[in-house]
Image: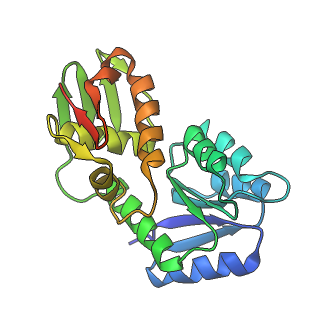
């Protein structure tokens, strides 16, 4: 069976080796790039890259520029690495369509766990799900969403979030429960992660975004 390919982009060779060694232990095929331009060249030259681990601060093109270029053509999951801990960087990453955000220094084991979690969802084994509620149709196999017959372009994480809401329609869900279920691990983040994704999801769904109700002081509930 062909190995799952992961593109690791960082201008520090030691960081690429550290991350690459841990991924290789899980039998992933690691493809490396040392700067933003090489990352784009690798991504478009190598077929079937399943996930990208991308540093922010790099020569030639930075991580933000790489994300913008890739998002014009692909929804491939992207995990962003950064030495910065500033809130605006994290929010910018989510606005651009980054799926996960990890600040350096980090535990390679946690990084690999996040990679595993994303790939379990994108390569899920078993019967795919399809939901139809209040004019919203979500098809997991096609990875498509329509609202009143019009297609809605969602990022990977926005799609997973909407599917979780529809699976649990009518149930009040805490932010912690959403994080642990949608991100599929004990996420060491805060409410901003959920709130940012919900805000974008609501905006893309138009009037149907109002079906995602805020439960003040707790979380959210999808009411169809």
Q: Is residue 86 left or right of residue 170?
A: right
**Point 57% across, 83% down: residue:** 21
Res 140 visible: no
Res 8 visible: yes
Percent position of residue 169, x then y: 16, 35
Q: Quadrant of the C terminus?
A: top left
Percent position of residue 58, x then y: 79, 59
**Point 63% across, 74% down: residue:** 105
Colour scheme shown: rainbow
**Point 40% across, 68% down: residue:** 116
Q: Residue furthest front?
A: 217
**Point 44% across, 32% down: residue:** 199
Q: Is residue 8 left or right of residue 152?
A: right
Q: Is 199 or 7 nearer to us in this picture?
A: 199
**Residue 197 to residue 122: above or below:** above
Mark count: 0
Q: Is 43 or 118 nearer to us in this picture?
A: 118
**Residue 116 to residue 21: above or below:** above
Percent position of residue 126, x then y: 18, 56
Locate residue 130: give its quadrant: top left
Q: Residue furthest left?
A: 170
Q: Is residue 199 left or right of residue 141?
A: right
**Residue 118 to residue 116: above or below:** above
Percent position of residue 153, x then y: 45, 29
Q: Quadrant of the N terminus?
A: bottom left
Locate residue 78: give its quadrant: bottom right
């Amino acid at each position: 069976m062909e190995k799952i390919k992961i593109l690791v982009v960082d201008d520090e060779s030691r960081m690429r080796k550290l991350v690459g060694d841990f991924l290789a232990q899980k039998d992933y095929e690691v493809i490396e790039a040392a700067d933003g331009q090489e990352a784009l060249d690798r991504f478009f030259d190598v077929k079937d890259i399943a996930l990208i681990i991308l540093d922010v601060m790099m020569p030639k093109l930075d991580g933000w520029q790489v994300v913008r270029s890739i998002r014009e053509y692909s929804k491939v999951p992207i995990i962003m690495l950064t030495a910065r801990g500033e809130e605006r960087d994290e929010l910018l990453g989510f606005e651009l369509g980054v799926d996960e955000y990890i600040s350096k220094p980090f535990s390679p084991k946690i990084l690999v766990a996040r990679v595993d979690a994303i790939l379990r969802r994108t390569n899920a084994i078993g019967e795919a799900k399809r939901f139809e509620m209040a004019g919203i149709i979500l098809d997991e196999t096609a990875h498509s969403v329509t609202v009143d017959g019009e297609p809605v372009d969602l990022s990977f994480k926005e799609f997973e979030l909407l599917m979780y809401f529809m699976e649990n329609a009518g149930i009040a869900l805490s932010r912690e429960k959403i994080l642990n279920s949608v991100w599929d691990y004990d996420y060491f983040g805060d409410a901003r992660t959920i709130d940012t994704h919900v805000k974008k999801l609501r905006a893309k769904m138009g009037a149907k975004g109002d079906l995602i109700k805020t439960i003040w002081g707790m979380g959210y509930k999808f009411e169809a």
